[in-house]
Image (spheres, helix red, strand yellow):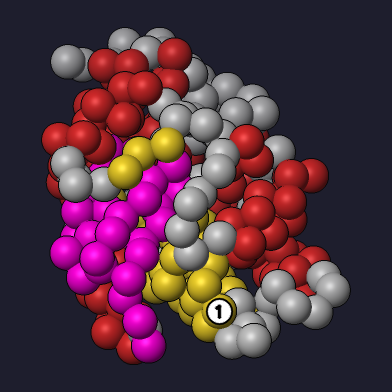
Amino acid sequence: MELQKDAQAGKLRTQEDAYREAFTRFLAGTDEKTVTHAYLRGLVEQLPARRVLLDVGPADGTTTRQLAPHFERTICIEPSEPMRRALALACPQAQVLAEPVLEATVDARADLALLSHVLYYVPRAQWVATVSRIMEWLAPGGLLLVLLQNPDGPCMRMVHHFTGLRYDLRQLADELAALPSGLVGGIELDTVPARYRSGDLDETVTVADFHLSLPGGTSPTRGAVTAYVHQHLQDGDGGYVLRHDQHVLRVKRPVS
């Protein structure tokens, strides 16, 4: 399905088919999943225990499916009913909770919790409360991974340019470090590289629209996004490249 030429970026989530196609095109042109899954597997191998995986906001379960075989039990929190259907196909062994994080009850303690690219959709004032809630579900010595795009990279500079939005896990790290002792034992920030490439202008603009479809932002016209892609994303060889490196906040719960 071709997106309408006069469609506005930032509105894709109200057009489910268009959103899914844009996401599919993005995944076809990026190395994000390959690089990220390798990074996550490396961390999993270092865990002292692998009893419970908790994936908060797993969407269609692509990453959950990669990690679940390493754990005895998998629990997911996914409020979206369409995503729960997809998750059931991708990871049928997972226990899936439909309540939002701040309302959910988890009857286990996780050795690894994942909050991947979810905080874009959580009000900034609730970030600490959301992460603190997940930390309560970690086993002693357990690890929470929070993923968002690097705010200083080309992709998020584009987002900020058009929407004024900025998401920075470094600020969250400072806020978590100021919490009373007992919940947060250590905080580290990693950068995981990712890059989208395409030889097609229309497809690149569609993918740019996908990244601009965040709540609370303004909605530039497709023409404005096309002009931005022409100016900033050409790779010099007739194609286009969009770096979207990820920040990963590693938050560890104290052993005791």
- Helix or strand or loop: what does disc 1 sit on? strand
Image position, residue 163 (x, y; %): 64, 35
Q: Residue furthest front?
A: 107
User: Would you say residue 55 sits in the magenta stretch?
Assistant: yes
Which residue is disc 1 drawn over?
Answer: 140
Q: Is residue 15 above or below residue 199?
A: above
Residue shown at the point (69%, 59%) measured from the top left: 132
Res 17 seen here: yes
Residue shown at the point (48%, 52%) measured from the top left: 107
User: Would you say residue 235 sits in the magenta stretch?
Assistant: no
The region drawn magenta spans: 48-77
Q: Residues within 10 Å of mark 1 (few under 14, many from 20)?
A: some
Image position, residue 255 (x, y; %): 59, 87
Res 197 seen here: no
Q: Is residue 172 above or below residue 130?
A: below
Q: Tell me the kind of residue under disc 1.
A: Pro
Image position, residue 169 (x, y; %): 64, 64
Front-most of 174 and 88?
88
Dividing the picture into quadrants, the one containing residue 246 is bottom left
> Where the N terminus falls, by quadrant?
top left
Residue shown at the point (75%, 69%) measured from the top left: 176
Front-most of 127 and 244?
127
> Where the C terminus falls, by quadrant?
bottom right
Q: Is residue 48 above or below residue 50?
A: below
Image position, residue 178 (x, y; %): 84, 74
